[in-house]
Image: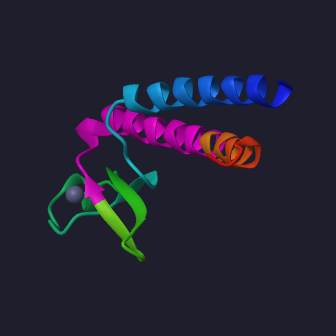
């Protein structure tokens, strides 16, 4: 009986976490890196006055390859939100994995 009640509680938690996962907005894996650099125009302010340009780079491993992908800095806050969504998704997946293992260990033969 305890086992059945326990299983029901676990399935409920599993269901809530799955809903939370599906409700997340767009996901962006990797870390965002704000950098300052000089450009290729020698008459630019970055060369003349040393005022470097800010750039945004997404550092990410995709398909087993590490990549650094340029992202327009105007989209920094959107990228941060999507990145936080990804981090939240990872935490939810970790929790789901623990719950799913418990379910597998609780479940009787069907
Ligand atoms: Zn420049």
User: Residue 3: where, in percent of width, then height?
Assistant: 81, 31
> Relative to residue 70, is residue 63 depicted above or below?
below
Give 107 or 43, whichever is nearer the viewer.
107
Horizontal relation, residue 108 to residue 21: left or right = right
The residue lying at 55 percent from left, 45 percent from top is: 90
> Relative to residue 10, is residue 44 depicted above or below?
below
The residue lying at 31 percent from left, 33 percent from top is: 78
The residue lying at 41 percent from left, 37 percent from top is: 80
User: What secondary structure do most residues of the magenta stretch adopt?
Assistant: helix
Q: Is residue 35 magenta?
A: no
The colour scheme used here is: rainbow
Give 50 or 104, whichever is nearer the viewer.
104
Horizontal relation, residue 45 to residue 58: left or right = left
Give 103 or 20, whichever is nearer the viewer.
103
Q: Is residue 80 magenta?
A: yes
- Res 75 quadrant in image: top left
> Relative to residue 6, is residue 110 depicted above or below?
below
Q: How many badges with numbers are in the image? A: 0
Give 14 or 20, whichever is nearer the viewer.
14
- Res 5 quadrant in image: top right
Considering every residue shown, the one lying at the far right of the view is: 2
Q: Quadrant of the N terminus?
A: top right
User: Residue 43: where, in percent of width, then height?
Assistant: 14, 62
User: Residue 104: where, in percent of width, then height?
Assistant: 68, 48
The residue lying at 17 percent from left, 68 percent from top is: 42
Considering every residue shown, the one lying at the far front of the view is: 110
Q: Magenta span covers which residues?
A: 70-95
Q: Quadrant of ligand 1?
A: bottom left
User: Residue 99: where, in percent of width, then height?
Assistant: 68, 40
> Relative to residue 22, is residue 69 depicted above or below?
below
């Amino acid at each position: 009986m305890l086992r059945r009640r326990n299983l029901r509680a676990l399935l409920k938690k599993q269901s809530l976490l799955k809903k939370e996962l599906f409700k997340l907005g767009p996901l962006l894996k990797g870390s965002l890196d704000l950098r300052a650099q000089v450009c290729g125009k020698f008459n630019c302010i970055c060369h003349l006055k040393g005022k470097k340009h800010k750039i945004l780079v997404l550092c990410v491993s995709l398909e087993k390859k590490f990549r650094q992908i340029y992202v327009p800095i105007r989209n920094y806050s959107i990228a941060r939100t999507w990145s936080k969504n990804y981090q939240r998704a990872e935490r939810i997946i970790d929790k789901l994995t623990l719950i799913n293992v418990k379910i597998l260990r609780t479940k009787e033969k069907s």
